[in-house]
Image (tube, helix red, strand yellow):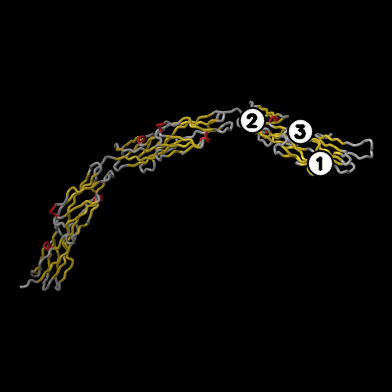
Amino acid sequence: MLMGINSRAFSNPSNPDSNLAPLIVSSPVLTFDPNENRFYPNVWNIADFFQDPNQDSLSYAIVQQPDDLSGLSLSLNWGQELAFGGVPTLPTSFTVRATDPGGLYADLTSTLQFVPEPVSHTVVDATGTRTQVDLNTFFRDRDNDPLTFELSGTSYAANAFIEGGLLTYSGTILAPVRMGVTATDPQGWSAYNVIEIQGENLAPLTVSSPVLTFDPNENRFYPSFWNISNFFQDPNQDSLSYAIVQQPDDLSGLSLSLNWGQELAFGGVPTLPTSFTVRATDPGGLYADLTSTLQFVPEPVSHTVVDATGTRTQVDLNAFFRDRDNDPLTFELSGTSYAANAFIEGGLLTYSGTILAPVRMGVTATDPQGWSAYNVIDIQGENLAPLTVSSPVLTFDPNENRFYPNVWNIADFFQDPNQDSLSYAIVQQPDDLSGLSLSLNWGQELAFGGVPTLPTSFTVRATDPGGLYADLTSTLQFVPEPVSHTVVDATGTRTQVDLNAFFRDRDNDPLTFVIDSIISSGSISAWVDGNLLSVSGIINSSVRLNIRATDSHHSKVNNTVHIELKSN
């Protein structure tokens, strides 16, 4: 008898030369794979399994159906094709018969085989440093074949081995261990399953201590949000859930929101230090808390100008900066041209030297986290009155009815030792009878008008923010004028002329005279001595002398002296 197959052949032994019964020449195996819901093979050609010694044609029939409860169904098609159907769940057997024309027959009985199946199983809890697993609970063979087991494609092979149906894992398990195992039956059919062993559940760990910083200068958080999952780790590689378990102080101005389960977003306009706590929880309820404190970037503080104290001035820099979380600050001179006169020790800036013009020094304050702020320290010395640095001259030319210059920029005539901005005013107007008028435009442009006829003076003032001032008084100058005069009668061979009668200077400047040219048909000589013009020689016809008069301010004008022979 073949394994899984029963056969019977029937004949008449009393007649050796009689018809012989058919023979069974093959023992086929039917296998069902419940993993794929598939038969191997899916049909039999029964004729392949029988042979008739007399070479008779045989007919075939199913003489024993499978057990109704097994789930297997058979059908015989085209007289010899045995087709398999249903969804078998239990072992069973069936019999087919081959019969020759004389009625002799042979029966072939076969038993249904099953492919092993993986069985779903809960995670195995580790037992200390040595964990054993009965692999028979992870597989099923419906025909109860004994199975052999083998580790398959696992990185834990060095820690695990299989003996019989027992898997042994050695070592401490933190993160879950997943091992592939293949179970094989005696016919060589196999199934694959994964054995998962979990260690003792351990609480999550904090792996980072993040810092939240708010910059009140830019109204900005660094960073703008946190991915909380970056700050925790679970020793068992469990998935963690996150929550805010302590909100910031209501008075701090900081607000938190948890988005998409793990993004912590920051909002509000914080003004006070505060702390907050987030929690990571594993599926077993174990958790870890992370508490963080809000940090602030230092801020520059507006401050009045510092008054110098002699030749050594000291400034407390902590009054120029603020750190809302009270971090100690370090200070450094930044980009200043006064570094040779200044140094910083602790929080004290010391400046050595006399200060006239205001001193501006840049200082950078840095907190322990490396955040910094910049401010400017202004130190002013003793306030000194403005100075006059120029004595401008205003000149009027009555010949051209024109002022030289026509306007003044008063700012050009003053300077402030402290480099203060100055304001300007007319504090003494010209004499009303002089004909000169003044106007102050755009705060510092002094414009001149009128038609002056008499000398006069006026005063302008420059005043600093502290009320100290300087006055500048100027007197109107006049260009000399030619005076119309009658013809001069020659007096013999020497004629003298007072040139003051030919010129006028309204501010009574003394004039100097020179002869620019002489027009004469005779032979004469002429010279000037002081204000006296002398002409020597016989004058028979008209003599014209072009005389230039110059005042003490180098203003010039010309006139003509006409001399003729006196007629009788």
Residue tagged by mark 3? 67
Does residue 249 show up? yes
Name of the residue lying farthest toward the left: 568
Does residue 148 show up? no
Query: Gap in Å between the C-alphas at discs 2 and 3?
Result: 34 Å
Residue type, label 3 = Asp
Q: Nearer the viewer, mark 1 or mark 2?
A: 1
Residue 122 has which mark? 2
Question: Counting residues from the N terminus, which is met first, the one under dot 2 or under dot 3?
Answer: 3
Residue type, label 2 = Thr
In the rendered structure, are the residues bearing label 1 and label 3 in contact, judged by CB atoms less than 8 Å apart?
Answer: no
For disc 2, the neighbor class at 10 Å (few under 14, some 14 to 19, many from 20) is few
Question: Counting residues from the N terminus, which is met first, the one under dot 1 or under dot 3?
Answer: 1
Query: Gap in Å between the C-alphas at discs 1 and 3?
Result: 20 Å
The answer to which image quadrant residue 54 occupies is: top right
Q: Residue at x 81, y 43 (%)?
A: 79
Residue 109: x %, y % from top left = 81, 35
Residue type, label 1 = Ile
Question: For the C terminus, which image quadrant?
Answer: bottom left
Q: Nearer the viewer, mark 1 or mark 3?
A: 3
Residue 46 has which mark? 1
For disc 3, the neighbor class at 10 Å (few under 14, some 14 to 19, many from 20) is some
Q: Using residue 261 as the reference point, say whether residue 249 is left or right of it.
A: left
Residue 180: x %, y % from top left = 67, 35
Q: Which of 338/493 is in front? A: 338
* Residue at disc 3, secondary structure: loop
